[in-house]
Image (spheres, rainbow, N blue to C red):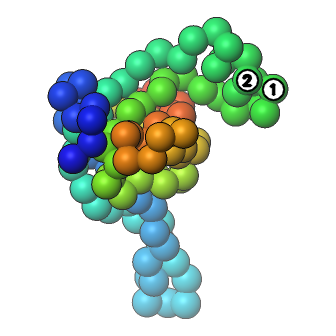
Amino acid sequence: MSRVTHLLNKAAEVWRYSAVSDGMGGFEPQWSQIATGRARFSQPNATERVSAAESQARLTHVVYVDTDADLRRGDELRMDGRKFDVLAVFEPSMPGTYLRADCFAKQLEL
């Protein structure tokens, strides 16, 4: 358990994309839920937004999760009917504290 577990105030589902055989030589995209865990969703500050823009990334949220979370780039976090694409996952300079995921909020289609 990390030192910041008490600050992770939301339940979030981790979904991962995979390509599944369609039985006719092709593949169909499929999203599968692989985990549910605690997370903290924050707005990025101005410096983080500028840094993301310089690397041509669309950063809308910074999400903190426990160190043992199975979360990687390309995954999708789902919470309260909202979806967030995971752009990158970082470990801070002090290992074992938390993981930080830079995310982009996706607009839900009607």
The type of residue carrying mark 1 is Glu
Closer to the camera in the image, 92 or 48: 92
- Residue highlighted by disc 1: 54
Residue 88 in sight here? yes
Closer to the camera in the image, 11 or 84: 11
Q: In the picture shown, does residue 37 fall above or below 6?
A: below
Horizontally, residue 88 falls left or right of residue 76, namely right
Query: What is the x, y in percent for residue 103?
Result: 51, 34
* Location of residue 49 by image quarter: top right
Closer to the camera in the image, 82 or 97: 97
- CA distance separating discs 1 and 2: 5 Å
Toward the top, the furthest residue is 46
Q: Looking at the image, how many numbered discs can be counted on the residues?
A: 2
- Residue highlighted by disc 2: 51
The type of residue carrying mark 2 is Ser
Horizontally, residue 64 falls left or right of residue 59, namely left
Residue 80 in sight here? no
Q: Secondary structure at mark 2?
A: helix
Which residue is at a point 52% across and 78% down the rendered structure image? 27
